Image (tube, rainbow, N blue to C red):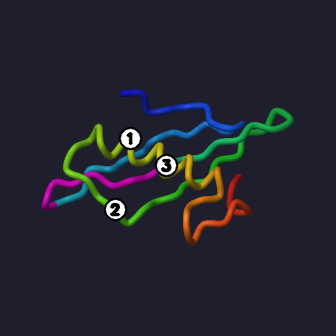
Amino acid sequence: MERSLQYNGYETVAKPLLLDAPRRWSVDIDIVRQEAGKVHVKHFSAEETLHIEEEAIASSLAFGHKIIDGKQPGIPRSQLP
């Protein structure tokens, strides 16, 4: 499964982490923007956890896309890098 996607001028990089008992994966994303030769990165985490790594990757990417689109409650677009 692809962990990194280009989306609306940003790169989204899924960074799920394996959590301790019970074995669950976090929903974590880095959103990356390059501008004038500089790389800007911001990390975001959701409260959701999943049992399967591939599902956590897909959820992380979807979470990042919602942030970029300004559709993630509690995370305004102004927090983007």
Secondary element at tag 1: helix
Decide if residue 16 is on the left or right side of residue 39: left
Q: Can you identify the residue that label 2 sits on?
A: 48
**Which is nearer the eye, 79 or 21?**
79
Name the residue rendered at 60%, 66% in the picture.
75
Magenta residues?
21-29
Q: Amino acid at mark 3?
A: Ile
Q: Can you identify the residue that label 3 sits on?
A: 29
Using the numbered discs, state the Cα–Cα distance from disc 3 to disc 2 in whole angstroms: 12 Å
Secondary element at tag 3: strand
Q: Is residue 40 above or below residue 67?
A: above
Q: Is residue 33 above or below residue 70?
A: above
Q: Is residue 25 magenta?
A: yes
Secondary element at tag 2: strand
Other-residue count near label 2 (Cα within 10 Å), few / some / many at <14 / 14–19 / ≥20:
few
Using the numbered discs, state the Cα–Cα distance from disc 1 to disc 2 in whole angstroms: 12 Å
Q: Is residue 59 above or below residue 75?
A: above
Q: Please tell me which of labels 3 and 1 falls first in the chain.
A: 3
Dot in front, 3 or 2:
2
**Which is nearer the eye, 17 or 79?**
79
